[in-house]
Structures are given as structure tokens and as C-alpha cells.
Amino acid sequence: MAVQAGALSLAMSDEHEMLLAAVREFAQREIAPVAAGYDESGEFPLDTVRKMGDMGLMGIETPEEYGGAGLDTLAYVLTMIEIAKADASHSTILSVNNSLYCKGILQFGTERQKREWIRPVASGAEIGAYSLTEPMSGSDAGNMTSRAILNEARTHYIINGRKSWVTSAPYADRIVLFCMTTAEAGHRGITAFLIDSKAPGFSRGKTEPKLGIRASATSEIIFDDYACPVEQVLGGVGQGFKIAMTVLDAGRIGIAAQALGIAEAAYAAALGYARERQAFGAPIGSYQMIQQKIADMKTRIEAGRALIYQAILAKQRAEQTGGRYTTEASMAKLFCSEAAAFVTDEALQIHGGLGYSKELPLERYYRDARITRIYEGTSEIQRMVIARNELGMR
């Protein structure tokens, strides 16, 4: 595999090949056999998450000095695809740790914050989370009602509010939190904070009974006069919206990879079934209607992969120039999430009634794929972002 854009190129190195083989073997040996059980129970897969940490997967792009593996975005994408092929819930936990938690602190944190707040999460010893959404504030972040008020001594921000749909929150040790410090400023009044979930004033609300990615625990978090030291402000007061959007650029590449992994798993199952299943004296794969489905599924998977690679190149370019790669990340996330919906639906259709049964993982792939069109920016938001950037209406 080699992709080029301008002076930048993307190619699989020996290190990438070794990582891919190791992650694939681990995912199929350790995760795939237990995925259905965790999906059924909704239990958080802490044991296998710790094993991912031992392999360096919970901080893939994090430099070794901060407890990570020190690899690149391609390594992260390859890992996400392979983990998602085994189980989307595990890949969601992996994504939050890597893209939403570690990425933001690496890019915007002080040296002290990086050393204190990244190492335990990048190593897998602790779980990280990212909290932007509220019960009445999803895509419209400027509408959030949580508040952080500086105390008279100017030593702590007193935080009050309720956040919702926080991935990994029931088990998170550390959280990157976004809330209002200057409400009248709208999204320009949002500030990011580094939160220790063991400190007084923090509690967890209801755990969401989700349709898919059920082993990726999601819950509300509640702040009741939580005192956050000023040293735990991330990136400066009023910089929260910029941080959140920048982090989501990286996160969307990860979700695109997750969606692609789910699609690949469903496609592999459909391909095998189309070769083996007999109908009217021949394999069903010999019939044109099934062949059309196989062709369309494969084409969308490979088109999605190309968009992900283009997004990685755009990210590399942005890291050199200080720019953004929002459009490329949004295109990859939009296309791959919708491709996953298409592929899982067609794979289930090829299997017929058997695909509708929990005896096979097809129905789990189908359910898990659905969230990729919602979190880290809905498909509608991705289209809006892409169009506005193209029209120059940022």
C-alpha cells in the first residue's frame, strides 16, 4: 500500500506490517471470542482493555516519554480497523483514549500536564474520557449549561452541571471536560479542564442502555461544586471550543477506521457465506443479485479506505504547516460510517434469516455500525462542515 499527495506519501513500513500482524492476532484470539458475551451483558471489558494497554495500543501516537507507543496515525488507523473487526466496543474505548483524551493534552497541554495526565492513560493503567455533550447540547456546543466559576482566591474553578453520553465514563479515571466559563460569549466562552474523577464533587449518573457498542460503557457525569485547580485548565481560558473541534478532527479519522473495520468484518462473513450457501443447486454467489451486492460492498470499503488514507496525509500536512484537516477527516468519517451501514445491511440480507439471529455476529455488526453516523459529529454535521469549508463559510 502506498498513497501520495504532493510531497507527502503514505506507505506500510516493516514496523506497520509487524504491528498489523500482532494486533490482528491479538484481536482474533483475545477479543473476538468474548465479544458476543460482553455485548449481551453490557459489561465493560476491563481485562482485555488492560491487555491492549500492555501492547501499547491505548496510546499509539503518544510519544514514549509520556507512556505511549510513539507510532504514527497510520499505525493508529490499522489498529482501529483490526480491533473493530473483532469488536466495535473495544475499538470505541481505544478511540477515546487515543484520539479524544491523549491527543488534546498532547497538542494543548503544558509539559507538566502531559507528564501527569497522559502517562497513566496512554499506558492503559487508567481509563480516559472526553466530555462535551450535555442533555440539551449536542451538535450546538455553544448551548451548554454547565458552568465553571473562578473562586475569590483565584485558585480553583468551581464546576457545576451535568454532562451526557460520556463514553467510558462509568470507568474513567481522568476526563477532558468542556464547560462554560463565560456564558455570554457563546462557544468562545467554553474552557477545557482536566478532571480527576476521584475528587469530591464528581459523580456518575445513569448508564445508557444502548442499541450497539454495548460493552463500551456510556453514562452521565455530574459536577456538584467540584473544585478544579487552575493548573488543570487545558490550553487557556476560552480556548475550549477550539480544542474540542481540533481534537474531533483526529477523532473522526479514528471513527472512520472503526466503521471500516465493522464493514470489513461484515463483508468477510458475507463473502464466505455467498461461496458456501447453496440454493437451486448452486452457490448463491453465482447469482447476479448477490454478485451485485458483493461488488457494491467491496467498492464502498475500498473507497472508504482511500478517503481515510487521504485524511492521514492531510493530517501530516497540517502538522507540518499548523493548519487543519477538517474537511478530509469529515469526508472520511461521513463516507465510512454510511458505507458501514450499507455493508452491514447487505451482509445481513445475504445471510437471510440466519443473519437476523444472534447465533451469528451479523446483527451485532449491524447494530454497532449505527452509532458511527451519530457520535463525534452526525452525518448531517459532517455534510455541513464539508460544504461550509468548500464554500468558504467557516
Image (cartoon, rainbow, N blue to C red):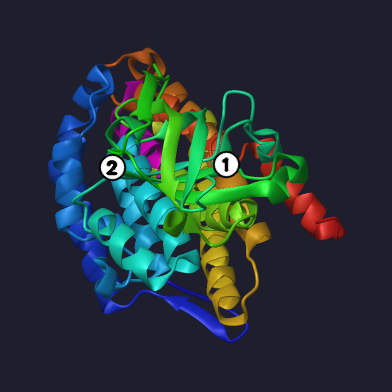
* Residue 266 is inside the magenta segment: yes
x 62%, y 32%: residue: 138
* Residue 65 is inside the magenta segment: no
x 69%, y 36%: residue: 140
Decide which of 159, 283 is in the foreground and name it.
Answer: 159
Element class at badge 1: strand
For badge 1, the amino acid type reads: Ile
Image coords of residue 387 (percent x, y):
79, 51
Q: Main secondary structure of the magenta part?
A: helix
Q: Is residue 287 visible?
A: no
Decide which of 35, 129 is in the foreground and name it.
Answer: 129
Count of numbered marks: 2
x 81%, y 59%: residue: 390
Image coords of residue 174 (percent x, y):
33, 46
Image coords of residue 355 (percent x, y):
36, 20
267 relative position to 25: left or right: right
325 is higher (above) or lower (below) than 28: below
- Residue that badge 1 annotates: 149
- The quadrant in which the N terminus is found is bottom left
- Mark 2 is surrounded, within 10 Å at the Cα level, by few (under 14), some (14 to 19) or many (20 or more) other residues, namely some
x 28%, y 42%: residue: 173
Element class at badge 2: loop
315 relative position to 63: left or right: right
Region in magenta = 262-283
For residue 238, which quarter of the picture? bottom right
170 relative position to 101: left or right: left
- The quadrant in which the C terminus is found is bottom right
The disc at residue 173 is 2
319 is higher (above) or lower (below) than 387: below
